[in-house]
Every structure is written in C-alpha cells, then in structure tokens.
Image (cartoon, grey):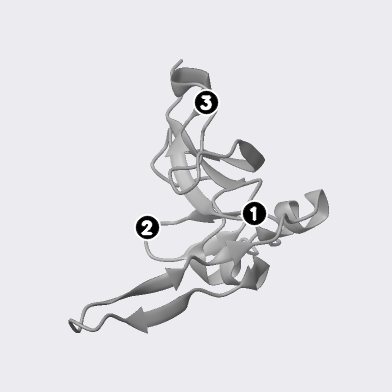
Amino acid sequence: MSYEGHVQVICEQGHFFEAPDPYHAGDPVCPHCKSPSAWINSVDDTNIDSNGVIPPAVMVGFIRQPAVPCTCTCGHKHNASETLFRIPSPEETRAARHYFDGEKYIPLNSPPKPRRHRRRNV
C-alpha cells in the first residue's frame, strides 16, 4: 500500500506554505524566512481527493495580518509585507479539514448524505 500526500504549514513567523510530506522530504522549512514550522496539517492525496485539506477559502479565517500591497516607482506591484497567519487550535484544525469530491470541497465532519432507498414493486 502506498501513500501520497503533502502538508500545509504555518512557520513560527506566521507564513503559510505547502510542502512535500515530511516523511519523504524531511521537516519543512519556511521558504520566506527559513523559520521552522509551528503548525502542520497533513493532506492525504493517495486517492486524489485531498483528504484533510484546508481550502484557501477557509484558511483566510486564520489570517492575523493581511499582505500590504505597494507599487514601486517603476510601476511594478508587489507586497511590501506577506500575509501572516495565526496558529489554529487543534479543534479549529479538525473543523476546517475538507476533502475534494472532484467538484467542490466538502467538510470532513459533515454528516453523510442520506441514502435513497428504491421501492420494490411487490
């Protein structure tokens, strides 16, 4: 049995990034500031459903400081500072985890869809 996956990471400084699974690639280090990770969310991609992923629309709820955009004197737009995230609690992490059904993200903790029973003609 094989495993394919990646991790979503927030470093000690609050930068969010995604990295290969640490089992295969070692502990992730922040590409922005080289700080070690403070929070890791494992995502199982084995069945191509991103089981456990926290989608971007949910991650915005953990922003503690949004990026500050600026325009250089030459007209180029960039961020003067990066978006910084707070570390979610274990309960928040569990509640935020989703899977991808091929069309949309579905919360892992959502109740199962009711089964439809077919009537049999007797």
**Residue closest to the eye, 94 or 108:** 94
Residue found 55% across the figure and 26% down from its top: 27
* x then y, percent, for residue 55: 51, 61
Secondary structure of residue under mark 3: helix
- Residue at 80% over, 54% down: 89
Circle 1 sits in a helix, a strand or a loop, which is it?
loop
> Of the residues shown, which amino acid type is indicated by label 1?
Leu
Alpha carbon of mark 3 to alpha carbon of mark 1: how far? 23 Å
Residue 120, position as x, y percentages in the image: 56, 61
- Front residue of 65/54: it is 65
Callout 3–callout 2 Cβ contact below 8 Å: no
- Going from the N terminus, do you reach mark 3 or mark 1 first? 3
Above or below: residue 109 compared with residue 41: below
Where is 13 relative to 56, above or below? above
Q: Examine the image and state in which quarter residue 122 appears.
A: bottom right
Q: Residues within 10 Å of mark 3 (few under 14, many from 20)?
A: some
The residues tagged by marks 1 and 2 sit, at their Cα atoms, a distance apart of: 15 Å
**Left or right of 24, for residue 63:** right
User: Which amino acid, by three-letter code, is at mark 3?
Assistant: Pro
Identify whether 52 is placed above or below 63.
above
Q: List the residue tagged with mark 2.
A: 102
Kind of residue at badge 2: Gly
* Distance Cα–Cα, label 3 vs label 2: 26 Å
**Residue wearing tag 1:** 108
Q: Position of residue 82 (x, y in %)?
A: 48, 65
Observer able to see residue 122: no
Nearer the viewer's eye, disc 3 or disc 1?
3
